[in-house]
Every structure is written in structure tokens, then in C-alpha cells.
Amino acid sequence: MRKLMVATLLAGAVVATPALAQDVGPTFTGPRVEAILGYDHVGAGSDVDNNNGRDDQSIDGLLYGIGAGYDVNLGSAVVGVEGEWTDSTAKSDRYDLTDQFGFGRVSQGRDLYIGARAGILANPATLVYVKGGYTNSKLNVLAGNTNETTDRSFKLDGWRIGAGVERAINTNTFAKLEYRYSNYTDANIDYMNGATSADFDVDTDRHQVVASVGWRF
């Protein structure tokens, strides 16, 4: 009888342990990596006046890249830090236009982002969050009426905010849908001889809608 009671208690402990682990939040916690794909729109900001009657100029393309982060599940809320490297197919396609929202004819280059996010758990498998941080983007200058890039580029500094929904597929895998808005306020020019111009003011907007799939360690 005593052996039966001990066996029953051990079996109950084995069953209770996973349940207890779920109570303290097995998802949305720890380091993560992800693949990013989405829509990218870059254009003149509201304060720009190019004096050419075409201040609504913009470029659109496919955004792709990778991200990484670290989250802490607090029970009903999640906080974390994150970073990204992305690139884009967006570029100017009007050869007869030399002033493309103030930068000439350009293609969107790499973008670096570092920031933080915070959210609430709508249910144990769904996180709704907001985010914000610093972004540094590169615009490659295209040569005249060709698709070749020069060795000159604009580098833009700015900030990003966004919001999204993350869904835990299981403890280790997840999927996200996210909207982000970036505004770049400072820029400089990198020349082909290695020289860099002094910083100057810009006002460039960027809107992105992206989807991600990732792995949590």
C-alpha cells in the first residue's frame, strides 16, 4: 500500500511539473532569431519642400532581412530588446527625374535598427506589443539613367516606432505581423574617395508592413 502511495505521488509530481512551467510563462521569453519579409515605402516627409512641385515622390519595394532579440515574460506582460539588419529592393525608376524626394535617383540600401518593445498577453499564445528605437539607413546613389550604383551614398539617422502581434506556434517557434514607421532627420554623404560630408537636416519617412517567422531558444 505504501509503495502504491509513493508511486501515485511521484506520478502526480511528473504531471504537475509541466503545468507549473506553463504558469510561469514558457513562451515569449529568452533569446530569439527571425527572418523578416514585407513591404517597404520610402518618401519625402511632411516638412520637405523640394521646390519642384513633386514632394510626394516615393520609392517602394520588398523588404527582407534578419532580426534577433531577448524577451522576458513577466506573466501578463512581456518586455525585451531587439535588433535588425534589413535590405530592400526599393529604388527610383524614373530616369528623367533627377530630384527624387531630395536625394537624387537612389536605391534603398541596408538598414540597421536597435530598440526595445513591450506588450501584453491577449492569451497565453498571443502577444500584442509596441516598439521603438534608433534606425540608421543607407540610400545608394544610382548613376544617371542606368541601374548601376556609384560609390556615393547617403546615410540617414532617425527613429522608429511600431506595433504588432506575435503568435507562439509552440514553445520554440513563433510568427509575427508588424507595422513600423521610421523618420530620418539627419544625414551625411559618403563619397567614393572615403570622405564624408558634414551632417545636414533631412525629413524622410518610411512605412513598412512586415511578417516574420522565428525560433526562440
Image (tube, rainbow, N blue to C red):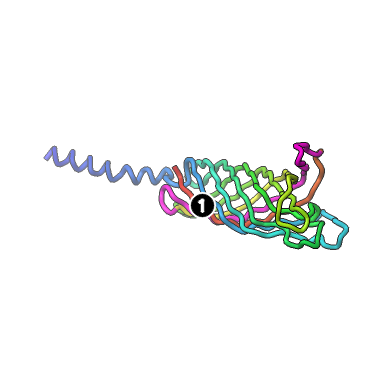
Return the residue at label 1.
127
Stretch in magenta:
169-197
Residue at x 80%, y 62% (from the top left corner): 96
**At which x and y percent is residue 154?**
75, 46
Label 1 CA crowd tier, 10 Å (few <14, some 14–19, many 20+): many
The residue at 69%/52% (across/down) is: 108
Q: Residue at x 66, y 49 (%)?
A: 161
Amino acid residing under circle 1 = Leu
Q: Quadrant of residue 12?
A: top left
Q: Nearer the viewer, residue 134 or 187?
A: 187
Q: Is residue 133 left or right of residue 50?
A: left
Q: Residue at x 77, y 41 (%)?
A: 191
Which quadrant does the C terminus fall into? top left
Q: Where 48 sits versus 20, above or below?
A: below
Residue 166 visible: no
Asked which quadrant contains residue 100, the reply is bottom right
Q: Is residue 207 above or below residue 136?
A: below
Q: Is residue 71 magenta?
A: no
Residue 49 position in % (x across, y down) = 85, 56
Q: Position of residue 105 (x, y in %)?
A: 76, 55
Which quarter shows the N terminus?
top left
Asked if residue 141 can be seen in this view, the reply is yes
**Front-most of 120 and 151?**
151
| 94 with respect to 69 (left or right) | right
